[in-house]
């Protein structure tokens, strides 16, 4: 019994020296624990402190060795207490190992979370850069749109001015063309009237010449001259080449001094020629 108590005292005494190190380790590990884990660790620490106090009380109550040997029930109780203490110490050590494993797991999870957070932050920065780039592109597009609208307005104004100018020029050209056509029509009508007058004069001339020719023919028949052949040539006043009239009368058989005579008369109209008469007789 005395040996067991001494062993327990040594264990508790040694534990007192190592408790400071354990407290330092717990303080370092509590920073990585969750609030529930911290409460659980505090509960375990409280239980361990209570057990240490109980052991100290038992050590105070232990009588001298000779007394302990005389009380077997105390010896049995001490053995049971030592066994319970060993179980509690084992449970505490296993709990501590679990806490350490949990701490390692939490550290790994925290590292994974930190990595995920860094990745998310990097993606956020990339998205922010894309947003800034898109905003700058949007501003450039707005500036380009403003410039294009200004150019379109200028082009529309220029087109309206050009259309107005073209319409004005076209109206002026049309008026000039109408005036020219009207003046040309007036000139042509005047020309036509002059041609009509010339034609009337020509008809009058022709009638006069026909009368004169009939008189000449009658006189030639009344007073024939031997060896005379009659040729008559006529022209009118100035006319264009389109107003050309020709009259051709072939030989006409007649008698002069009881001899056959061929009488030929030829009438033609050419510009700027005088009336000419030629009378001959066939030999």
Image (cartoon, rainbow, N blue to C red):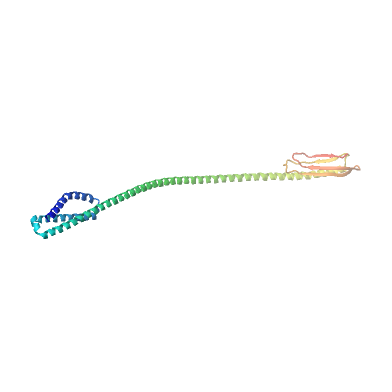
Position of residue 160 measured from the top left corner of the image (x, y, whole percent): 51, 46
Q: Position of residue 222 (x, y in %)?
A: 87, 43
Quarter residue 98 falls in: bottom left
Answer whether residue 38 is visible to the viewer in this image.
no
Residue 184 visible in image: yes
Residue lying farthest to the bottom in this orientation: 73
Q: Is 257 positioned to the left or the right of 136 in the image?
A: right
Q: Quadrant of the C terminus?
A: top right
Of the 4 image quadrants, the one containing the N terminus is bottom left
Query: In the figure, is residue 107 to the left or right of 242?
Result: left
Question: Which of these two is toward me, 186 or 211?
Answer: 186
Q: Nearer the viewer, residue 240 or 68?
A: 68
Q: 47 or 33: which is nearer to us?
A: 47
Residue 16 horizontal/vertical position (percent): 15, 50
User: Measured along the vertical axis of the image, is residue 35 above or below residue 247?
Assistant: below
Could you say which is closer to the camera, residue 68 or residue 159? 68
Name the side, left or right, on which 141 lies relative to 9.
Answer: right
């Amino acid at each position: 019994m005395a040996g067991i108590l001494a062993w327990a005292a040594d264990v508790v005494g040694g534990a007192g020296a190592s408790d400071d190190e354990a407290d330092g380790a717990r303080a370092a590990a509590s920073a990585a624990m969750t609030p529930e884990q911290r409460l659980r660790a505090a509960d375990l620490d409280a239980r361990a402190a209570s057990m240490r106090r109980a052991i100290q009380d038992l050590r105070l109550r232990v009588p001298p060795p000779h007394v302990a040997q005389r009380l077997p029930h105390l010896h049995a109780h001490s053995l049971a207490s030592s066994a319970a203490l060993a179980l509690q110490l084992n449970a505490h050590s296993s709990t501590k190992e679990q806490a350490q494993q949990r701490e390692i797991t939490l550290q790994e999870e925290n590292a994974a979370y930190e990595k995920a957070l860094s990745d998310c932050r990097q993606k956020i920065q990339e998205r922010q850069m894309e947003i800034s780039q898109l905003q700058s592109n949007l501003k450039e597009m707005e500036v380009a749109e403003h410039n294009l609208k200004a150019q379109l307005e200028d082009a529309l104004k220029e087109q309206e001015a050009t259309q107005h100018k073209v319409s004005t020029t076209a109206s002026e050209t049309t008026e000039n063309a109408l005036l020219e056509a009207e003046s040309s029509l007036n000139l042509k009508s005047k020309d036509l009237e002059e041609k009509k007058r010339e034609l009337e004069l020509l008809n009058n001339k022709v009638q006069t010449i026909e009368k004169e020719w009939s008189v000449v023919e009658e006189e030639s028949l009344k007073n024939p001259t031997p060896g005379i052949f009659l040729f008559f040539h006529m022209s009118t006043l100035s006319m264009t080449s389109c107003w050309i009239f020709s009259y051709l009368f072939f030989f006409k058989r007649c008698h002069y001094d009881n001899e056959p005579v061929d009488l030929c008369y030829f009438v033609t109209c050419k510009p700027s020629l005088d009336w000419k008469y030629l009378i001959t007789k066939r030999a």
